[in-house]
Amino acid sequence: GQQVMQIPQYQHVQEGEDFTTYCNSSTTLSNIQWYKQRPGGHPVFLIQLVKSGEVKKQKRLTFQFGEAKKNSSLHITATQTTDVGTYFCAGPLRFTSGTYKYIFGTGTRLKVLA
Amino acid sequence: ETGVTQTPRHLVMGMTNKKSLKCEQHLGHNAMYWYKQSAKKPLELMFVYNFKEQTENNSVPSRFSPECPNSSHLFLHLHTLQPEDSALYLCASSQDGGRNTEAFFGQGTRLTVV
């Protein structure tokens, strides 16, 4: 079945350093979504990428969708303590009913040391 | 406040108990989901309801029983659970079951089975 893997599983960085998490799918994706879950919180939608090679930015966050639409990355420039949390990517899988479910990646847990 | 409210936030139950988790969304969405989040596993989709109809049961044991009386409410009835069922149970909603809709998650119910 479809699998979505993320690396690294954990990342500790000093405040001000950059951070990147990578997402790899076993199948081609029609789109990919990214979510952030703060410690003790719930996943919150960040962004969706649809086009091959698409790059989107949200302040210090840069999201990229691979040319083959099988991988994606999230890069944070100059991390801050508010960036702490687990970042998940998610790709859609179509059910026979026609509805879709999102397969979530394994997540990357980011800790930022002040 | 995400527009998706889950109760209770915490629940401790014995293996012979019966309890129910409740989810309510105020976003006018038509699709609702139950996810399980364990410490060492990615988010696992359990059930999907689209326009009040259960479209998918992701091979979930029968000790978990969902109910969706209307498009705003979703329940998860629990009975004779096992300790390994202890996890964070997240409810989510989306506009519909399509592939380009973001999911809005509730804050979750932290379930401990003793």
Image (spheres, helix red, strand yellow):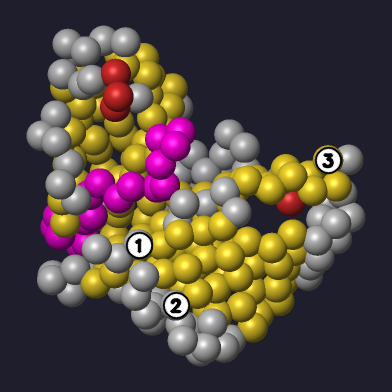
Sequence-earlier tag: 3 or 1: 1
Residue at left 20%, top 62%? Answer: B51
Quadrant placement of the N terminus of chain A:
bottom left
Check disc 3 and give the amino acid type.
Leu
Q: Do discs 1 and 2 belong to a common subunit?
A: yes
| Element under disc 3 | strand
Give coordinates of residue A111: x percent, y percent.
72, 43
**Label 3, label 2: how far apart the Cα atoms are:** 32 Å
Check disc 2 and give the amino acid type.
Lys
**Label 1, label 2: how far apart the Cα atoms are:** 11 Å
Residue placed under numbered mark 3 in the picture: A113
Residue placed under numbered mark 1 in the picture: A3
In the drawing, what numbered circle is on residue A70? 2
Say whether residue B39 is left or right of residue A44: left
| Element under disc 2 | loop
Q: Give, as a single range, the part of the protein colored magenta.
A: B38-55
Q: Residues within 10 Å of mark 2 (few under 14, many from 20)?
A: many
Q: Looking at the image, which is closer to me, A10 or B72?
A: A10
Residue at left 37%, top 19%? Answer: B112
Give coordinates of residue B41: x percent, y percent.
40, 41
Residue at left 16%, top 56%? Answer: B56
Q: Is residue B5 magenta?
A: no
